Image (spheres, rainbow, N blue to C red):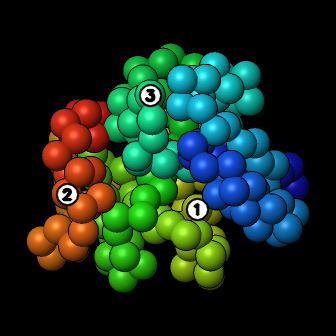
């Protein structure tokens, strides 16, 4: 079986390295890291990932804007995106929290069985399998979260482009 290709985009090198090492340890994934949001689109075009794990809050370009650009790029539009964020709890993610139509994976990523399933679920099993590329329409936002719990959460919700994927 060919390893699935996962691109991890986060401005924190320690985070992308930890995720890469954990995923590669399973021997099921080929993982590439990108720590600069401004270079991420080019990296994605070159790497041709089966899945993109994308940080929500990054300098230069936030995850919402980058996801919008990914989804409007003909070469990348069918690639599933999962947002990585420190602004959602594991419980909220397990209950199906999404923003801008994308599922959320809480940071720090510990890759429990549930999180491995969350990563594996949107991966197409064949090139023609594109039905799982998104879990909701771009305008739909569902969160199981109560009112904002911290400053970062309220910044994320108010950041405009996150809700315009």
Residue 100 visible here: yes
Res 36 → quadrant: top right
Q: Secondary structure at mark 1?
A: helix
Q: CA distance from mark 2 to mark 3?
A: 19 Å
Q: Are marks 1 and 3 in contact (CB under 8 Å)?
A: no
Q: Secondary structure at mark 3?
A: loop
Report whether 148 appears left or right of 153: left
Q: Are marks 1 and 2 in contact (CB under 8 Å)?
A: no
- Sequence-first disc among 1 and 3: 3
Q: Residue at the spot x=37%, y=50% of the render?
A: 102
Q: Secondary structure at mark 2?
A: helix
Q: Residue at the spot x=44%, y=28% of the render?
A: 60
Q: Residues within 10 Å of mark 1 (few under 14, many from 20)?
A: many
| Position of residue 122 measured from the top left corner of the image (x, y, whole percent) | 53, 55
Q: Are marks 2 and 3 in contact (CB under 8 Å)?
A: no
- Numbered tag placed on residue 154 in the rendering: 2
Vertical side of 6 occupied by 151: above or below: below
Q: Residue at the spot x=87%, y=63% of the render?
A: 27
Report whether 106 appears left or right of 137: right
Residue of label 1: 119
Report whether 126 appears left or right of 71: right
Vertical side of 7 occupied by 26: above or below: below
Q: CA distance from mark 1 to mark 3?
A: 26 Å
Q: Residues within 10 Å of mark 3 (few under 14, many from 20)?
A: few
Vertical side of 66 occupied by 30: above or below: below
| Position of residue 75 measured from the top left corner of the image (x, y, whole percent) | 57, 20
From the image, state whether disc 1 or disc 2 is nearer to you. Answer: 2
Q: Quadrant of the N terminus?
A: bottom right
- Numbered tag placed on residue 60 in the rendering: 3
- Sequence-first disc among 2 and 3: 3
Residue nearest the viewer, comparing 27 with 88? 88
């Amino acid at each position: 079986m060919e390893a699935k290709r996962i691109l991890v985009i986060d401005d924190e090198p320690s985070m992308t390295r930890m995720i890469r090492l954990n995923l590669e340890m399973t021997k099921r994934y080929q993982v590439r890291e990108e720590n600069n949001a401004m270079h991420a689109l080019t990296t994605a075009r070159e790497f041709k990932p089966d899945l993109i794990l994308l940080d929500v809050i990054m300098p230069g370009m936030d995850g919402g804007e980058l996801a919008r650009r990914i989804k409007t790029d003909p070469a990348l539009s069918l690639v599933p995106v999962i947002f990585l964020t420190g602004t959602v709890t594991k419980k909220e993610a397990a209950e199906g929290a999404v923003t801008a139509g994308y599922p959320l994976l809480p940071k720090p990523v510990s890759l429990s069985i549930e999180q491995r399933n969350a990563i594996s679920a949107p991966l197409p099993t064949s090139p023609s399998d594109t039905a799982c590329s998104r879990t909701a329409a771009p305008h739909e936002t569902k969160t199981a979260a109560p009112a904002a719990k911290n400053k970062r959460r309220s910044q994320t919700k108010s950041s405009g482009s996150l809700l315009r994927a």
